[in-house]
Amino acid sequence: MAVRWLCLFGKPFDGGKRMDHGGSQQHQQQQQQHPMEEQQQYYPQHPAMMRLYEVQKEVASLGPQVCTFSGLQNDRDFKRLERELTRLLLEQVDTEGKAELQGARKRAAQEVEGLLRYLEENATHPSRVAIEQLSNEARRLVDERVVAPQRAGGVAEINDELVDSLQELVLRLTQVKTEGRVSLRKARYRALTRLCAVQDVIEGRTQEQTLSLPLSGDTHEAVHRVNQVSVARGQLVALLMGLSGRDSCAHLSRILTEMQVELDALDVSGNAAVRNYRKQVVEEINGLLKHLDLETEGEDTRYDLAQNNSIREIEAVRSHVSHLREGVLRHCVMGDLSFRPKAELQSLLTHLDQVDTARNPCIREARRRAVVEVQAIVTFLDLREALARRQPGPGEHPSHRAVWLVLGSLSDLQAQVLGFDGKRADKSYMMLEELLTKQLLALDAVDPQGDEMTKMARKQAVKFAQNILNYLDMKTDEWEY
């Protein structure tokens, strides 16, 4: 039976249509009357077609592997897939000059060529290269500051500077565009998972350094065994960053589990300091063990954050926010200021604050952006209300009045920014950016003339204008989780 597989490339290859061998006498007569039409017939039992069926089955099994491959050209899986596809492409099938067989062979070859192109595109995609560059940068940093000193018998340089550097790399990784490609999402997810795990281990070590630990070996004979956890910590960091050529997750997990058993068996009775120290180390081992499920990580759908429950919560909030934003803008166009869903917006902020990010930087960023969307509507409503209530007196300082005029213009521009749904290349985007910049320049030109109230008002107006610009940038930066 022919195997059908709807690939990303070209038409699905069905291996030819079935023939009705019990066809009618009329059909047989038509064949006899038109012998030249033999080239239009199908040959399901022909040896060439049978071989093409087998090729199609192999293509069907390799296709999903190609589409989810997240490595580079020098990876073992890349070379294996490239070798298998090239073998299929070079498969010699004798079509005996029959048009249908030639067409089937051509379609099969096109599918194989498409898979080869897709495999190479994923492995050399600029975003994949960027992910690898950031991963290498993280490896060099961790190797220099943590792994290499411990291997040399020294002390790792773990401090706030290292933690901040790792955090910057995490943020840069979250900003890498994947264009919705499964392979790129997997690669970014794997890099982020490992880097965040290292960050977690190192941050835990930073907090521990505030204690008088590890204890000296002279304190108790059991302390030497307890202090071995620092070696395991270094092994884990090296393993997560790909700096360990020998260890594996299973091997290190076994070592840590055995260490836990040994710690439970230690006799530390009568020494409260050692007992408390052992308790802390056991807790740290439990924390290290949770990072050792990475051998199968990335092979399931965890990289697809669209299926993540927290992301779904955030997207539900964003959908609600979008509905409220449309209502606010619609009422503002009509000059109606009675629609003020601030209580509802505050409840959404509370909901977002309770979303579990599981220390995932992409989920944290998605939540932060949703919070900014809510806050943008709240500040818009606040300014509109302030402008409606404003009743300037005859003694108002001219500079103060000038600031309020700019705020009025900013309110109108913010309404346009809230409703903007385009890209940075759009003329409307460039116009909004230019008009907002002009308002900043207008504020800069305001001379407070020593009036403290004007100084404070101008400072707040500048911050407000910058927030609108930042919000406009956020709406058009094409960020994805």
Image (cartoon, grey):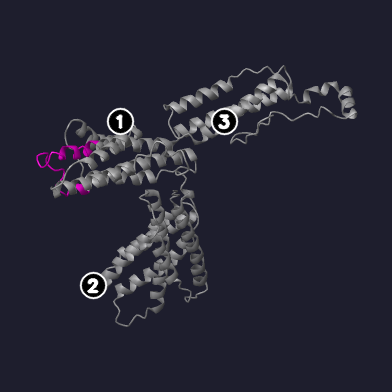
- Left or right, 49 with respect to 305, comes to right
Q: Is residue 461 visible?
A: yes
Q: Secondary structure at mark 3?
A: helix
Q: Is residue 156 visible?
A: no
Against 177, residue 88 (above or below) is: above
Q: Write down the quadrant of residue 176 in the picture.
A: top left
The alpha-carbon separation of the residues under discs 1 and 2 comes to 62 Å
* Residue identified by numbered label 3: 61
Q: Check if residue 213 falls in the magenta segment.
A: yes
* Residue identified by numbered label 2: 452
Compare marks 1 and 3 and give the one earlier in the sequence: 3
Marks 2 and 3: which is nearer the front?
A: 3
Crowdedness of circle 2 by 10 Å Cα count: few (<14), some, many (20+)?
A: few
* Residue identified by numbered label 1: 244
Residue type, label 1: Ser
Looking at the rendering, the stretch of residues picked out in magenta corresponds to 207-231
- Left or right, 268 with respect to 439, comes to left
